[in-house]
Image (spheres, grey):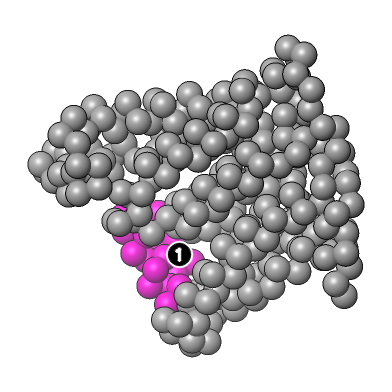
Amino acid sequence: MFRWIVDLNRNTSSFNLSIFRATYCISIAVVHWFRYDSFFESYFKLGNYDILFFDYYQLEIFGMQGYYILRAILLLFLFMAGFGVLTRISLILSALVFFLYEYPICHYINLHTTPIVLITLILLSISPGVSFISVDTRLGKKSNPLTPMWTYKAIMLNLALVYFSAFCAKMVNTGFSWGNGHHLSNYIIEQALASNNSIGFWAASHLTFMRFISIFTLFFEASFLLTLFNRLWLRLLYVVVALCFHIGVGFLMDIYFILIFSYVYFI
């Protein structure tokens, strides 16, 4: 039952970890290339930018221009980390700037991806063999060809805890009544009104379907920790389920977790 714990010190090829680092960092950069513009601009146009930035940074130079400068710095470090230029330093700086960039937004938008991205970048920065495939190694810098299994398990545990925390939040707020379909239906309608999503309106009007999706969501979020065990068939099953889950969320609520594709390769 606890075989995955015993295997923590076993070494494996650093190839997969390097590919994950590259796709993960570049995916974050691409997402943030397009993300939050309308959200920030709406606050700045209303003259409320001091609410977002000044209470945290206490720097008068931060406004819409400061936001774009910070994002440019974040993109630079993420692309450097993705391609493996000063890999560890780039990962550490990416985590730092990512925190500065996302922290003010988290006061106003509940972003499930913020802690998982931050922790994953930190874990990658301390992982042996993370620069196995990189510009650094092409330039002659040595990299460990082997990576201990604790690196993979720590990153997977981080992902699993995000799903499990979402399950716990539902239990604290509504308990198992969240599975009756009404809560999810109301949430989908709220999102559909904001984005004029006809698919969301259609789905929310079918309560039986909403109940099925609600129960499925609770089971998926509560049981994702099972992916930590060394059972290939179990991990493959959850890869399919996770893809269906996030594609469904995208269609119904216009919420897209692009990074799931990096994790699918990693799992």
Q: Is residue 248 visible?
A: yes
Using the image as rendered, state which of residue 262 and residue 210 is in the foreground. 262
Residue farthest to the top, as pictured = 139
Amino acid type at mark 1: Trp
Left or right, 101 with reference to 64: right
Q: Residue at x 83, y 57 (%)?
A: 8
Using the image as rendered, state which of residue 169 and residue 80 is in the foreground. 80
Q: Is residue 207 visible?
A: no
Q: How many marks?
A: 1
Left or right, 11 with reference to 58: right
Does the magenta segment cover residue 185?
yes
Q: Position of residue 110 (x, y in %)?
A: 38, 59
Q: Position of residue 259 (x, y in %)?
A: 59, 45
Q: Residues within 10 Å of mark 1 (few under 14, many from 20)?
A: few
- Where does the N terminus fall, quadrant-wise? bottom right
Q: Position of residue 210 (x, y in %)?
A: 52, 74
Q: Residue at x 45, y 39 (%)?
A: 96
Left or right, 241 with reference to 12: left
Q: Look at mark 1 in the image and give the residue it sits on.
A: 202
Q: Which residues, given as a range, are shown in magenta?
A: 182-204
Residue farthest to the left, as pictured = 47
User: In the rendered view, would you say 189 is above or below 79?
Assistant: below
Does the magenta segment cover residue 235?
no
User: In the rendered view, would you say 238 is above or below 181?
Assistant: above
Using the image as rendered, state which of residue 107 and residue 151 is in the foreground. 151
User: In the rendered view, would you say 229 is above or below 222?
Assistant: above
Q: Residue at x 47, y 75 (%)?
A: 169
Name the chief secondary structure element in magenta. helix
User: In the rendered view, would you say 183 is above or below 128?
Assistant: below
Q: Residue at x 37, y 66 (%)?
A: 189
Q: Position of residue 247 (x, y in %)?
A: 59, 53
Q: Secondary structure at mark 1?
A: helix
